[in-house]
Image (tube, rainbow, N blue to C red):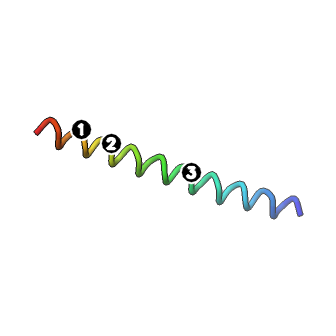
Amino acid sequence: MFTQEVTLFTIFTTIAVILVIMAIGIFLVKNKKIED
């Protein structure tokens, strides 16, 4: 039971980190396009 909670938390955290990285990447690309 404890292991399942940790696994779900790890998966959720990983997804959140990926979304944040993608958002930052898109944000940087938009800034570069505006500068160009």
- Residue 27 located left or right of residue 1: left
Q: Residues within 10 Å of mark 2 (few under 14, many from 20)?
A: few
Quadrant hosting residue 30: top left
Instruction: Give the image location of residue 18, x and y in percent.
Output: 49, 54
Q: Quick one: SS at disc 3?
A: helix
Percent of width and height locating residue 14: 59, 55
Nearer-N-terminus badge (2/3)? 3
- Determine the residue positioned at 77% across, 56% down: 6
Give the residue furthest to the left.
36
Which label is found at residue 31? 1
The circle on residue 16 is 3
Q: CA distance from mark 3 to mark 1?
A: 23 Å
Q: Which quarter of the image is occupied by the C terminus?
A: top left
Give the percent coordinates (x, y) of residue 25.
34, 47
Do labels 2 and 1 touch, CB within 8 Å? yes
Q: Circle 2 sits on which residue?
A: 27
Location of the N terminus by quadrant is bottom right
Which residue is located at x 65 percent, y 60 percent? 11
| Three-letter amino acid code of the residue under disc 3 | Ala
Q: Residue at x 44, y 48 (%)?
A: 21
